Image: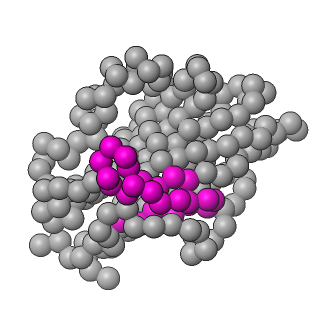
């Protein structure tokens, strides 16, 4: 394994965590598909590949049941629905900025009723990630919108993962990001960086 792949694997290990009581199925058994050259998505649940009606790019849809308040006496059943898409183009330092990408759409999202509550940024000079966690009142739901950008030499891969959580009123404010990290995985298979 080359230095570039080792560094990328270490970065991904820090970006993805799975520390809740319920363990996911082995990743090798998860369904998935390639969303850009060298980038694959896998999910522990139902994965469907379709073409976006707007862009023609491949879009993966993913869903699975989840259990909120797992450690309580009264767990609450729910559902996680995700859409994952990727585009690619020439790399530029200016475009390698997930926070800038989110800032460009934040006003439009507010008008649509999305209320951002938390932003978590991480990354290196190879992969950068911004998770935007929030809620929507009508319909009542929580979401995790992830901007993931990866540099592969002169190529920039720009990934959006948008997961929405639907559940009953008995779950007051679930911690939704751990479910995204537990049940979804992105794999990067890039060659040596020059």
Relative to 83, say whether 35 is above or below.
Answer: below
Percent across and percent down for residue 163 are 52, 42
Toward the front, the furthest residue is 53
| Residue drawn at point x = 61 percent, y = 74 percent | 29
Percent across and percent down for residue 104 are 25, 29
Relative to 119, say whether 45 is above or below.
Answer: below
Q: Is residue 178 left or right of residue 114?
A: right
Relative to 16, say whether 143 is above or below.
Answer: above
Toward the top, the furthest residue is 111
Percent across and percent down for residue 160 are 38, 47
Relative to 86, say whether 172 is above or below.
Answer: above
| Residue drawn at point x = 30 percent, y = 48 percent | 55
Residue 12 is one of the magenta-drawn residues: no
In this view of the protein, can residue 124 be seen by the observer?
Answer: no
Tell me the magenta residue range: 39-62
Magenta region, mostly helix, strand or loop?
Answer: strand
Residue 58 is one of the magenta-drawn residues: yes
| Residue drawn at point x = 71 percent, y = 34 percent | 167
Instruction: Tell me where residue 22 sits by quadrant.
Output: bottom right
Residue nearer the viewer, 174 or 77:
77
In this view of the protein, can residue 135 be seen by the observer?
Answer: yes
């Amino acid at each position: 394994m080359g230095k570039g792949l080792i560094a990328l694997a270490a970065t991904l290990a820090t970006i993805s965590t799975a520390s809740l009581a319920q363990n996911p199925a082995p990743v090798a058994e998860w369904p998935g598909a390639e969303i850009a050259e060298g980038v694959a998505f896998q999910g522990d649940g139902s994965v469907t590949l379709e073409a976006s009606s707007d862009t023609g790019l491949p879009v993966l849809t993913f869903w699975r049941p989840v259990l909120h308040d797992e450690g309580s006496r009264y767990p609450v059943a729910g559902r996680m629905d995700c859409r994952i898409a990727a585009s690619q183009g020439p790399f530029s330092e200016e475009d390698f900025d997930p926070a800038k990408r989110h800032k460009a759409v934040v006003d439009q999202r507010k008008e649509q009723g999305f209320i951002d509550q938390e932003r978590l940024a991480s990354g290196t000079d190879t992969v950068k990630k911004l998770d935007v966690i929030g809620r929507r009142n009508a319909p009542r739901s929580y979401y995790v919108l992830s901007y993931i950008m990866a540099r592969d030499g002169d190529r920039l891969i720009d990934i959006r993962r948008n997961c929405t959580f639907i559940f009953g009123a008995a779950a007051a404010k679930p911690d939704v990001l751990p479910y995204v990290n537990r049940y979804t995985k992105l794999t990067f298979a890039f060659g040596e960086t020059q």
